[in-house]
Image (cartoon, coloured by chain):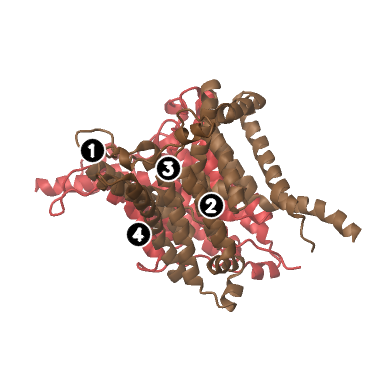
């Protein structure tokens, strides 16, 4: 049956595209999970990703090393996370205002600096092979590919991604373990639900929230580096293009839990892969589906979930509330 | 605790905030390798150097006055409306439909109809997040962000597939009939002896000022404004005082959305005379900075809107004169101002307050 085989191949290609599209969302959403579980609203995911993408591409372009770029990306995102903490934890500023401020500042700053430093209209120079993370082929991928069934899955879905995709995949169980099975995770969740109780137990609320924000910075750094030095080969202005907000939506859709968040990221990335693939091609029985409808789908689903029409999203109880120590 | 003197919180604090923000921006200018002093001079000349420049500055300020008022009204109720961008975008659709459908209506009929359409469109797009916040507890920050993306998708679909002028590549509607244009202000101002050249300043500027007056009346001289501010201060106290929280939240968000929607009058009806992609150009986000800088008071918001109008107008001059400083520099300044005036408000306020409280206590 040739039709079936063809359908299977398309499905496998979709799965590969979904994995590649989901990786930056997963990394950023897991970063947001730490911050939000500790009670700090993190709409600055977008800004941290964008800053990291710029820092990675700029550093990799100058040094020629992808690893130096990755380090710079993490440093830039952690710096922003600490700034967010300084405003919202130390000075108890409004967390949403601080996040918006970071997002807007970064969206301007990356272009201004890129324009002035590289003279390419806000872009960074194209990176050579050594300055970015290339695909890693698993042993025997090329030889196994012709095998029916398992072969294409092995070659297209599992093998052939860059290292940050595998880091994203490994991050899900790692974060789940950290949040649910360690002392740090217990404190993190407690600080987000009832900071007063944590304070009474002698654990610093501010310290725990700063730790959470640093984790968020590290993961957003990886996510931003994925965009500019793994998936693409340079920084382009506004290259995060709302992916930070999409990751936030995935985090909410996943009800602030690691595995459901992964599911949401895969769902959103799948929708995006379908959208790129369809582009006006009519579907059987349905006809042409407007691409914009698929683009809006993740946001509509998230609003529906927040409204309680599809399941129920219960936020950490102390989210958005600065902690004031009793005197 | 004695309150700080009024002039400290109303004049000194915003001035200090602005100075800190400009200092931080100067650091960025230095990083780029340009002179901050020269940049400031070019920017000021570009924004206020001649009549036409002032006209442009006030035209940008009109947009920011609308969105700033929108964000401020929501702020007074403890709500953060990040959705001004999407609300203005959808309102532009409503305005365009009225203007395109108006045919040969006289101008005195089209303009009020468009004003109503703009306010209704913006309010309608704010209604769902408002209702969800009031009735189902979904956080308005998240839902308004999501609604900005949904608005963008809806408008792209409509402009590309439905409203596009036939036989044309770029996704925009046909031009409105001249009777559906908002009159420009350069001629009336010319009779008054004020030259603004060919600037796009139009009637929407006066609508914006009137809206500012109405917001002031609403917030401080009506029962609903009182209820909104009480709710913003303390929900439990408001509840105890018999204020219905759900109704107050929905009303405030509808007013906020309507104000954001009116911004589309200036762009769609006053300048472009057609509906086009992304005509809002980020004005909804500038509104956040304007509301914070203006301390959520209409007078402050007018001043902050003019400041941002000057930054946008001066910023485009800046990119001509100093090519290394693109217009994105203005976005940096905008972000830094939100950071300093909004998020780090306490960090600057407390030392200032302590400074001015001490002499008073010593005297007492």
Residue furthest out toward the front:
B191
Q: Label 4: which residue?
A: A301
The chain to which mark 2 is attached is: B
The chain to which mark 1 is attached is: B
Instruction: Mark 3 and mark 1 in contact? Answer it, CB < 8 Å.
Output: no
Q: Chain B is drawn in which colour?
A: brown
Q: Label 2: which residue?
A: B212
Q: Is residue B317 left or right of residue B117?
A: right
Sequence order check: which comes first, mark 3 or mark 2? 2
Q: Is residue A188 left or right of residue A256?
A: right
Q: Residues within 10 Å of mark 4 (few under 14, many from 20)?
A: some
Tell which of B289 and B52 is nearer to you.
B52
Query: Both on one chain, marks 4 and 2?
Result: no
Whole-Å distance between the Cαs marked 3 and 1?
22 Å
Q: Position of residue B292 (x, y in %)?
A: 60, 50
Q: Tell which chain the image draws in red.
A: A
Instruction: Mark 4 and mark 1 in contact? Answer it, CB < 8 Å.
Output: no
Tell which of A10 and A243 is nearer to you.
A243
The chain to which mark 3 is attached is: B
Q: Where is residue A90 in the image (x, y as percent from the top left)?
A: 68, 54
Whole-Å distance between the Cαs marked 3 and 4?
33 Å
Q: Which residue is drawn at 49% across and 56% down?
A: B81
Q: Label 1: which residue?
A: B165
Q: Residues within 10 Å of mark 2 (few under 14, many from 20)?
A: many
* Residue B266: numbered disc: 3
| Mark closer to the observer (4, 1) | 1
Sequence order check: which comes first, mark 1 or mark 2? 1
């Amino acid at each position: 049956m040739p039709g079936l085989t063809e359908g299977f191949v398309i499905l496998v290609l979709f799965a590969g595209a979904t994995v590649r599209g989901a990786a930056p969302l997963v990394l950023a959403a897991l970063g947001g999970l730490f911050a939000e579980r500790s009670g700090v609203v993190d709409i600055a995911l977008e800004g941290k990703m964008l800053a990291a993408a710029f820092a990675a591409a700029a550093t990799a372009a100058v040094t020629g090393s992808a690893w130096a770029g990755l380090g710079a990306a993490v440093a830039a995102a952690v710096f922003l996370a600490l700034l967010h903490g300084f405003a919202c934890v130390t000075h108890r500023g409004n967390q949403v205002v601080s996040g918006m401020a970071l997002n807007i500042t970064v969206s301007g700053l990356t272009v201004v600096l890129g324009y002035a430093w590289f003279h390419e209209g806000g872009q960074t120079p194209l990176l050579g092979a050594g300055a970015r993370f290339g695909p890693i082929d698993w042993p025997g991928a090329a030889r196994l590919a012709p095998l029916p069934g398992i072969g294409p899955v092995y070659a297209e879905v599992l093998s052939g991604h860059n290292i940050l995709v595998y880091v994203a995949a490994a991050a899900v169980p790692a974060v789940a373990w950290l949040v649910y099975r360690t002392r740090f995770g217990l404190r993190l969740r407690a600080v987000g639900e009832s900071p007063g109780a944590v304070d009474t137990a002698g654990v610093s609320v501010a310290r725990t929230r700063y730790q959470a924000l640093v984790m968020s910075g590290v993961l957003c750094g990886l996510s931003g580096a994925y965009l500019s030095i793994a998936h693409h080969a340079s920084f382009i202005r506004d290259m995060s293009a709302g992916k930070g907000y999409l990751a936030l939506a995935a985090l909410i859709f996943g009800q602030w839990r690691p595995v459901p968040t992964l599911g949401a990221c895969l769902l959103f990335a799948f929708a995006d892969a379908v959208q790129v693939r369809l582009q006006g091609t009519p579907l059987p029985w349905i006809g042409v589906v407007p691409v914009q409808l698929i683009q809006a789908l993740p946001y509509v689903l998230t609003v529906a979930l927040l409204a309680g029409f599809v399941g129920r999203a219960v936020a950490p109880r102390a989210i958005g509330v600065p902690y004031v120590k009793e005197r | 605790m004695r309150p700080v003197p009024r002039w400290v919180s109303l004049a000194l604090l915003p001035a200090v905030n602005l100075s800190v923000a400009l200092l931080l921006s100067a650091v960025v200018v230095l990083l780029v390798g340009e002179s901050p002093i020269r940049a400031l001079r070019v920017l000021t000349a570009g924004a206020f150097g001649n009549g036409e420049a002032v006209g442009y500055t006030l035209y940008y300020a009109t947009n920011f006055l609308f969105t700033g008022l929108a964000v401020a009204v929501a702020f007074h109720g403890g709500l953060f409306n990040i959705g001004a961008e999407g609300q203005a975008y959808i309102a532009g659709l409503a305005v365009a439909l009225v203007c395109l459908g108006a045919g040969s209506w006289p101008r005195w009929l089209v303009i009020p109809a468009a004003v109503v359409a703009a306010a209704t469109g913006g309010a309608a797009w704010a209604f769902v997040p408002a209702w969800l916040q009031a009735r189902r507890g979904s956080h308005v920050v998240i839902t308004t962000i999501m609604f900005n993306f949904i608005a963008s998708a809806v408008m792209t679909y409509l402009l590309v597939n439905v409203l596009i002028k036939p036989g044309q590549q770029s996704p925009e509607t046909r031009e409105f009939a001249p009777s559906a244009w908002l009159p420009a202000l350069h001629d009336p101002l010319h009779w008054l002896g004020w030259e603004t050249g060919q600037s796009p300043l139009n009637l929407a500027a006066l609508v914006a000022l009137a809206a500012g007056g109405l917001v002031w009346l609403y917030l401080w001289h009506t029962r609903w404004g009182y209820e909104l501010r009480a709710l913003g201060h303390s929900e439990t106290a408001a509840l105890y005082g018999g204020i219905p929280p759900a109704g107050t939240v929905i009303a405030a968000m509808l007013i906020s959305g309507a104000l954001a929607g009116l911004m589309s009058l200036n762009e769609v009806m006053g300048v472009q005379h057609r509906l086009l992609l992304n005509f809002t150009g980020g004005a909804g986000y500038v509104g956040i900075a304007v509301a914070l800088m203006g301390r959520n008071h209409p007078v402050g918001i007018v001043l902050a809107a003019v400041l941002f109008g000057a930054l946008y107008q001066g910023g485009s001059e800046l990119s001509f004169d100093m090519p290394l400083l693109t217009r994105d520099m203005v976005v940096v300044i905008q972000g830094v101002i939100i950071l300093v005036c909004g998020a780090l408000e306490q960090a600057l306020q407390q030392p200032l307050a302590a400074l001015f409280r001490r002499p008073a206590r010593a005297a007492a």
